[in-house]
Amino acid sequence: MRKLLLLFAVSFLCQTVQAQTMQEKLYYTCKVWGFAKYYHSEVSVCNVNWDSVLLAVLPDVRSAASSTEFNDALLEMLDAAGPMALSSSYFPDTLPAELKRNRDFGWISSPTLRSDVKEILDTIKNNFRPHPSCQVEYTPWPTPSSSYWGGYLKFPQDSIMLDVNVHATFPSQDQKLLMFFKLWNTTQYFNPYNYVLDIPWDSTLYNHVVPFSNAPNVQALNLEFLKVVGTLDDAHVRGLSYVYNEGFPPGFYRPRIKLKYVNGNYLVIRSMEVGVNLGDAIVSVDGLTISQWTDSLSKYCSAGNPSVKGRSIADMLLRRLSVGINETLVLQAPDGTTRSVSVSTINSFSSAYDNFFYDYYYPADSLNDIEWTIFDDCNIGYMNFGNITDAEVDAAYAAMQTLPGIVLDIRNYPLSGNAWALSDKMYTGPMQFSKLSIPDVEYPGTYSWIYPSMGVAGNPTPYLGQVVVIVDETTQSAAEYTTMMLKKIPGCIVIGSQTAGADGNITWLSPAQDMSFGWTSLGVYYPNGDSTQRIGIVPDSFAYATPEGIRDHRDYVLEKALRIAGCPLSASDITTEKPVVSIYPNPANETITISTTGTKGKIDVVITDISGKVLMQDEVSNNATVDVSKLSAGMYFVRLKVGEFNTVKKMMKR
């Protein structure tokens, strides 16, 4: 009898020892639930309310005191899915390894899972066959009839993972787990870049599932959410993450100062604060060094490389949760001297500061509004991809085709498809410049290749001069794809600094009504298979803004580009503050008035159609009226030259 009691005690002790920690229980529950969601024949077509099943089982999972009780809870969940449809046909696994990185089911063999649970999971895995699912679909792009889906995904059951406003109705622990499980599994199966994360996505699940579910209030939940998506190392996530009323930590409010990250320094590039000057470097904020601030903010900052992380910290560094907070800044001037300044936060989302905080920045202010121009003192063309439209590309290239050099500025986000419009004119093709991995919504965790090309066969207008492309940490996504395309132009040279390393189309998810994020769901690679994610575009020649250049409104990066393009000296009009040149009314009827401030002298006016054909040319005084009554209705380009300053404006004629 004593032996039996001893054996019973030992058995009970072993069972207790084998009981999983809360982390382990939630880790495997998340994996089992997500796997069945996408692979089980009944769950994947929504014959089962899988969210309700999870919410019903989670209390048993959390309270399980032994391995047996935990596996009983998993078995209860899998039984609720119903029997897996058994396939009578063989399904060959012929995909190469790089196209099925996210289809990793090694965890099924874990000793944590009991043999009867493993048997069901193996049955699901072995009998799965690709099929349309109610859980994930393609989003047609660019039109509903398009055969190119572009990697945009939608999740009909998860468009809002928990359909509540967490600020109004704070979720229960199990509801928070539902949000977390959906978020994690969606990116587990459909993020093409899981394999390049610093912290494995499995580790994010293990390390964050308990803190996320235990978050005691809205602010704590928001911060946990941002920490989780921050581990995706994706600058798209950083730019597209949103939590209600707080923005990306630490808030919406900041002083009237805009910063730029340059080689480890945070330099002032715009200031409306007394005592804070252009070119100043931030040494400390409120007694904490820049290094300390970077350490504290990085956990909320999804970024793939130091360049884009610096860009993100530059945006976050001075933000606070309330308006009117005084911040003490220690600044270092370009000459090395330091001083302390007190500034106060304002609402940076006020329309009064739209341009101040959110416009692209060029050290030479004259570039802010330029679509394209020709630097007459050295006969080099310039296009600003953040401003130039597809139609303007036609006129610009017509004017520049015979020039010895063209500079293409992509320190911005390109408008529309201007790169395609330009490359088809400049390059004889077709030439493959990338390959894209498209997620397969019928076979979750796998991808297929497509091979985009550029250029037109027999192109009658190829460009034979020197092409120079300018990039920096603001060059992201479509801007990086544009750069990949233009790099194929023979002899093209890319200068500047490392780009953001976040290329590919975006899918959006909302864990709740007032929480959302976007992430890269299309994989972008060079034709040889090298990834651009996190790496970005590495310039052929590095060039950076300097404190002195920022202070003096000189664009040293553009000056270097012009020298490479064949300009013996930097063009003088890129070193001056921007004159303001305007035409009105626009749209025009009979006449337009041309006005300029910030410069003196006559204004050369050239009006062309969209093909670049010159229709009118004149030299006028400031505030002069120009008769356009003979022009037909349509769009025109008005090229204005005032002294050394050139710009091009669009004009609509009624």
Image (spheres, rainbow, N blue to C red):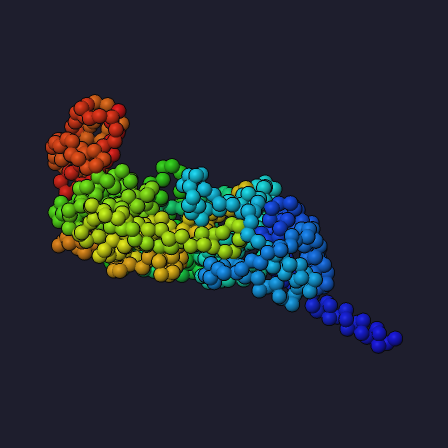
Q: Is residue 295 left or right of residue 383?
A: right
In this orientation, which residue lies closer to the viewer: 373 or 213?
Answer: 373
Q: Is residue 17 left or right of residue 182?
A: right
258 displayed left or right of 557: right
Residue plotted at (49% across, 51% down): 440
For the N terminus, which image quadrant?
Answer: bottom right
Q: Nearer the viewer, residue 404 or 366?
A: 404
Q: Position of residue 565 (x, y in %)?
A: 18, 53
**Residue in view at x 24 percent, y 50 percent:** 428
Q: Vertically, is 49 above or below 499?
A: above
Q: Is residue 147 visible?
A: yes
Q: Residue furthest bottom?
A: 3
Total numbered labels: 0
Q: Position of residue 453 (x, y in %)?
A: 33, 51
Q: Is residue 502 left or right of residue 638?
A: right
Q: Quadrant of residue 67?
A: bottom right
The relative height of residue 428 versus residue 11 in the rendered view (above or below) is above
* Residue 617 pos. (x, y %): 13, 32
Pick the residue in front: 274 or 272: 272
Residue placed at 42% from the left, 41% from the top? Answer: 146
Judge whether 280 appears above or below 358 on screen.
below
Which quadrant is the C terminus positioned in? top left
Q: What residue occupies the far right of the structure in this picture?
A: 1
Q: Is residue 268 visible?
A: no
Name the residue: 18% across, 56% down: 564
Residue 186 in percent (x, y) is at 53, 52
